[in-house]
Image (tube, coloured by chain):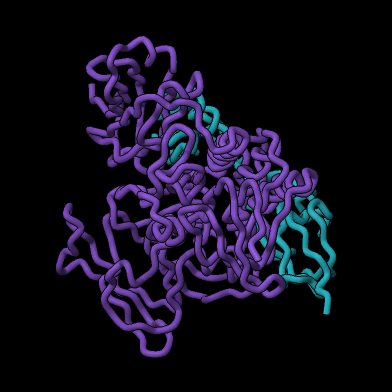
Chain colours: A cyan, B purple
Amino acid sequence: MEETRNLTCIGCPLGCSIQVEMENDKITGIFGNTCKRGEVYARKEVTHPTRIVTSTVCVEHGIIPVVSVKTETDIPKEKIMDVMRSIKKLKVYAPVHTGDVILENAGGTGVNLVATKEVLTKTK
Amino acid sequence: MISSVDIVIIGGGPAGLAAAISAKKNGIEDVLILERDHQLGGILNQCIHNGFGLHTFKEELTGPEYAQRFIDQTEELGIAYKLDTMVMDISSSKTVTAMNTVDRLFEIKAKAVILAMGCRERPRGALNIPGCRPAGIYSAGTAQRLINIEGILPGREVVILGSGDIGLIMARRMTLEGAKVKVVAELMSYSGGLKRNIVQCLDDFGIPLKLSHTVVDIRGRERLESVVLAEVDSHGKPVAGTEEEYQCDTLLLSCGLIPENELSLAMGIKTGSVTNGPVVNECLETNIEGVFACGNVLHVHDLVDFVSEEAALAGKYAAEYVKSDGNHTDAGKEILILHENGVRYTVPEKIHINRMPDELTVRFRVGAVYKNCYISVYAGQKRILHKKKQIAAPGEMEEVRLSKKTLEEISELEQITVKVEET
């Protein structure tokens, strides 16, 4: 099956419009990029696009009610919402430290969710 | 009672922290940071997305992680700071009046002051948007604070005006939290945001970006019910007949940042009309000797890495000023850096050749999108730099590096000009 995927390159402010022609999930042509970086980006973006997910998780007894978190490495783009669903019900207890693992294997990605901030315990 | 300190730094965000660390490393023991929030780190604490520190640390950090690296250094170096402290006034003789609930109202006499107060978002009142005044209208940064620090989702159906980076980041953030972001409208014909953010915050989630569009009406009595968007012509005026109504309970505004210079203006510091920040020389020193400025209070940056770099210089120059007992080395003649032809401003705006480092970074922004242009620097009539750029856009800060040696070789130099040259 032939298809054309349209992308915007994120390599620089030029933001080239890149067309990637595919046949049966194989790249048959990359057009529109003005440098090598564009081609590398397009190749990755149509075969296995990945993102780091950042969000927050509720904290009990903390000086603030939420702690910021991220996936330790990038995860497949189509799993972003799976990760978010796995975060939603979580609750952790203060103190939380930067780098603490908040959830293992977030959203079935095999990647851990870690805290990106210190949240100390609230003192009365 | 008036206490005294060598260097006082107004603001404990990325600029203030980097300036303090640098001042200390350059031999000044007595450094004090005054911060109005209950923690150091400034706005980075609410910027929980990744992408910070690529230049400085060669890795992608989130805002809080980037801040923590500087906070850790501040603690390790034993730099003093006061939190929950509001600076009320700085006199032209560098006496700072501040207050908090522990020290109450107090005064500190400083040998040098570093201004690092950052910037604020342009509010609705400054945008002249017609319509009702219901609840549900927030600046993008306010919504960011509500979600990322206070754990509150401000609304469920969202329209965003302005495609600056904070607006784009919030489009993604609200979508991840389950809100429906219906559209991002941008008055200009191009986005001021980074390409990466357009792709990863809008395209990834199928959020439409309408360029050359603005909000022409806001409807709803108690709570926002809808906004009306219209296309604008080349003069930014709405085109009749292009109106479209969007049902929503939340409108986020991401329409530019303004350096927060009330303290600077009150102490008699001269500011530039384009940057709204202090006019500084090669030492990032303002028109008041011994008062330095860095970070977003000086001019609004895109990347925190450059804030840290600039602030470290301010800290170093403030340290040198204090070590010289307030006696600057003979500065010699002041040379103005003029901006022409598409260059909207430069920082610094004036330099003393005697005092400049071997290589001086001059940062600036262009006023429009230029493709295949040259950035040129003239010393008097002589072109000393001609740099080809595939693209220069208002959303990305540019820089040129001036060589001291080159400038010294030019006899009777009066002024330097930075401009965009096409073809």
In this rendered view, identify the residue nearer to me: B216 or A33: B216
Q: Is residue B378 among the parts visible in the rendering?
A: yes
| Residue B388 versus residue A122 in the image, above or below | above
Query: Residue A85: percent from the left, percent from the top?
Result: 70, 65
In this rendered view, identify the residue nearer to me: B47 or B19: B19
Quick one: quadrant of the C terminus of chain B?
A: top left
Asked if residue B138 lies left or right of residue B336, the reply is right
In this rendered view, identify the residue nearer to me: B254 or A42: B254
Asked if residue A31 lies left or right of residue B228, the reply is right
Q: Is residue A46 among the parts visible in the rendering?
A: no
Residue at 62% over, 72% down:
B105
Q: How many dots with numbers?
A: 0
| Residue B388 versus residue A10 in the image, above or below | above
Asked if residue B303 lies left or right of residue B374, the reply is right
Asked if residue A78 lies left or right of residue B340, the reply is right
Quick one: quadrant of the N terminus of chain B?
A: bottom right
Judged from this view, the residue extending furthest toward the left is: B240
Residue at 47% over, 45% down:
B301
In this rendered view, identify the residue nearer to me: B312 or B350: B350
Query: Residue B220: percent from the left, percent from the top?
Result: 36, 86
Quadrant of res B25: top right
Quadrant of res B304: top right
Quadrant of res B241: bottom left
Judged from this view, the residue extending furthest toward the bottom is: B222
Judged from this view, the residue extending furthest toward the top is: B409
| Residue A123 versus residue B168 in the image, above or below | below
Query: Residue B193: percent from the left, percent from the top?
Result: 43, 48
Residue at 24% over, 25% down:
B421
Residue at 48% over, 64% down:
B140
| Residue B387 versus residue A8 in the image, above or below | above
Query: Residue B19: percent from the left, percent from the top?
Result: 61, 43
